[in-house]
Amino acid sequence: MKYNELTAAIKCPVFSRNDLALSGYRVLDYQLSLWVKKGYLVRLKKNLYAFRREMEQVRGEDVAFLLCQPSYLSLEYALAHYGFIPEIVYAYTSITARITRTFENAWGRFIYRHVKSDLFWGYLEMKTTHGRYLMAEPEKALLDYLYLNLARINTDDDFDGIRLNEEEMKNTLDKDKFFRYLGAFGVKKMEKWARRCLQ
């Protein structure tokens, strides 16, 4: 297959080897490697590529969803998105029911933290020009963070060190939903810190 045949066959900025196979196209590994080396393609991870000329059309959130499914953006990324923490976040942090892992590519750093499948809920589907991604609801993002960092939150100083924006949380969080979601985690130690979020 020639590169111009690839661009004619694939109409999306991002594609996988599986997309090529389903379309009936056969591309050899050395061809993809050559096109990456020449700068025609960008490799997101093994068997997942983007056209360099269309990189600007692809959002980091789209990439976060494509790199690991099922997953939804949560934790520090979502907390910053909702204005719950003051820091600028430089990684896309997601929750997955699969194993914990990290990827790095031209769009940035992507961190996936594992939770059991019983806790894989509480997200919204967001549409973009060339795809979609899942984003934790504000209540779930905060609870995901507490749940996965519980071992490091033992004192009031530990909690204060997170530097949560209490005013923003009070304005944004649905209190009934927050405590309903908290109950679904079934972790007693979370209750004290969760209640501190809404004081």
Image (cartoon, rainbow, N blue to C red):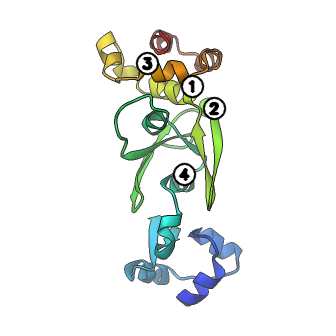
**In this rendering, which labeled residue sits more in front, label 3 or label 1?**
3
Q: Say which of 129 and 75 sits in front.
A: 129
**In this rendering, which labeled residue sits more in front, label 2 or label 3?**
3
| Location of residue 42 (image quadrant) | bottom left
Q: Which of marks 2 and 3 is nearer the N terminus?
A: 2
At mark 3, the secondary structure is helix
At mark 1, the secondary structure is helix
| Location of residue 62 (image quadrant) | bottom right
Disc 2 marks a residue whose amino acid type is Gly
Cα distance, mark 3 to mark 4? 32 Å
**In this rendering, which labeled residue sits more in front, label 4 or label 1?**
1
Contact between marks 2 and 1 (CB within 8 A): the answer is yes
Q: Name the residue under label 3.
A: 166
For the N terminus, which image quadrant? bottom right
Cα distance, mark 4 to mark 1? 23 Å
**Residue 20, visible in the rendered structure:** yes
**In this rendering, which labeled residue sits more in front, label 2 or label 1?**
1
Q: Name the residue under label 2.
A: 122
Image mark for residue 139: 1
Residue 54 position in % (x across, y down): 51, 72
Q: Which of marks 2 and 1 is nearer the N terminus?
A: 2
Q: Residue drawn 63% across and 84% down?
A: 8
Q: Name the residue under label 4.
A: 68
